[in-house]
Image: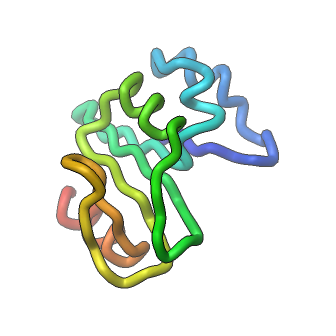
Amino acid sequence: MLAHNQGGLLNTTALARNMGVDVKTASGYIDLLLVFPDGDKWAIEVKRSLSPKPGKGFYYSCDDIQPVKKFIVYPGREKYPIGTDIQVISPSDLCDELTNSM
């Protein structure tokens, strides 16, 4: 798992190198990257807005990392797609997705 930390406590440069991920991707654009034992990756962006939109950096990072799933987690209750491959989802629904994928 690779987590983005605004306070800089994680050495994202070393993590990025070990995972073969661009340092910009690891340090600035994806809030949480889950890497499963089979190699599948999920990119997760966290937003406070009830009308969340991914930033350009999220798209850039996803192009670099090629995750199998992309999520925008927000404080709302509804689950809906943005475009063809990004799912807007609540924290509890993300937990359900994780449980169902195991």
On screen, 102 above or below 7? below
Q: Where does residue 24 sit, x and y in percent of width and height?
A: 61, 24
Q: Where does residue 16 sit, x and y in percent of width and height?
A: 56, 22
| Colour logic | rainbow
In front of the other: 93 or 60:
60
Q: Residue at x 75, y 47 (%)?
A: 6
On screen, 64 above or below 71? above
In front of the other: 94 or 48:
48
Task: Quarter of the image for the C terminus: give it.
Answer: bottom left
Q: Residue at x 44, y 51 (%)?
A: 44
Q: Residue at x 64, y 36 (%)?
A: 28
In the rendered image, which quarter is residue 3 located in? top right
Q: Residue at x 31, y 80 (%)?
A: 78
In the rendered image, which quarter is residue 63 located in? top left
Q: Where does residue 35 sit, x and y in percent of width and height?
A: 37, 38
- Left or right of 49? Residue 8 is right
Q: How many marks?
A: 0
On screen, 32 above or below 11? below
